[in-house]
Image: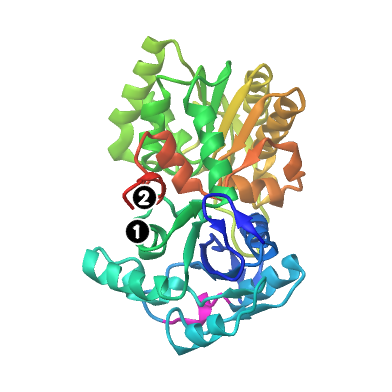
Amino acid sequence: MGEYAGLGEVSGKRVLVRSDLNVPLDGTTITDDGRIRASVPTIKALADAGARVVVTAHLGRPKGEPDPAYSLAPVAARLGELLGQEVAFATDTVGSSAKETVAALADGQVAVLENVRFNAGETSKDDAERGAFADELASLADAFVSDGFGVVHRKQASVYDVAQRLPHAMGALVATEIDVLRRLTVDPERPYVVVLGGSKVSDKLGVIDNLLGKADKLLIGGGMVFTFLAAQGHEVGKSLLEEDQLDTCRDYLRRAHDAGVELLLPSDIVIDTEFPSGDRTPAPGVVPSSEIPADALGLDIGPDSAAHYAKALADARTVFWNGPMGVFEVDAFAAGTRAVAQALTTVSAVGGLTVVGGGDSAAAVRTLGFDEEAFGHISTGGGASLEYLEGKELPGITVLLDEGA
């Protein structure tokens, strides 16, 4: 007998699991298997309970048709290694291979279907087309478990529509993500510090807007810094600049001041005359953030800023971090991101909640060699976590909680 929370007895049943296996590939080589590892506990729990586990997921952004560059075959192989058992692989999403592969499963066995986005119905905006594809997916299973947090903000067939067609439950990964995000939004322990980086202000508009009324401190890094600096009247050289967001940044600065929220911008910047690429050896320099030369571009927060940000984080009890401080993939421009990550581990060590908000931040933690266990939680869904913090409804969560679904 084997039960799974929310579904009851699953032994002998076909359980469709929507996982997030969207990992970076270099050809067929997986360069970061973090999302695959995060998906293992739910898949293993179902297999151990005797379910016949059918995993559906996407990789990359194929155009609604098969594309070998985005095949999940390497992912299925890696999943098998992590599970310690053979994982069957179907070479299509709902076709003859999928049907034969699922039919051949015995209790406790696992199969992975080919990239769900090879079918145009997965991401279709047309409810009927998306629903027709969901019908085909649902026909392969007796129950559904949603465990792909990185896609719960998408109204897609394998995330939303399938849950309306099968008995459903939240996977352990999604449940953990939602629990952590609630801790960030419902009476967070203070001081509450939010660190935002990445390239564009426009990607973070909603979260800044919402958190200005909730966080005690907002630390800004990455390429988005330069739009804030330009909004203060500073020259930013060749740095990334969103001129259409200058007024928005001025408004944020004003609102932060009025609300008593400490909005920190870097006092110094690591610059170079070119973006790092190819065989060119980086030639970094450090200048005050108000004195970026016309022929230079900013590629990281400077050492003084890194130390100041670490100090600003030192007394935090709750921290949410989304977006690197600089071009962390290049060692010459990685120090700011490394300093923030190190500061988060210190907060964790004294019992504070630290959340690394997915995407590039999670990749940076691994690339820079940090122990993932040193952080309170590393999210698998950058976009989903940001939308949750913006206060948006996540369709893939709403449908699981809707008793009528």
Location of mark 1 (residue): 164
Is the residue marked by circle 2 packed among few (<14), some (14-19), or many (20+) residues within 10 Å?
many
Q: Is residue 126 visible?
A: no
Q: CA distance from mark 2 to mark 1?
A: 7 Å
Residue drawn at the location 51% of the way across and 40% of the way down? 178
Report the amino acid beneath label 2: Val
Query: Which of the two residues, 265 or 16, is positioned nearer the viewer here?
Result: 16
Give the class, few, some or many, for how many residues have Cα within 10 Å of label 1's Cα (few <14, many ≥20): many
Nearest the camera: 314 or 37? 37
The residues colored magenta run: 66-72
Q: Does label 2 or label 1 sit earlier along the sequence?
A: 1
Q: Secondary structure at mark 1?
A: helix
Give the quadrant of residue 103.
bottom right
Q: Quadrant of residue 90?
A: bottom right
Residue designated by label 2: 399
Q: Are marks 2 and 1 in contact (CB under 8 Å)?
A: yes
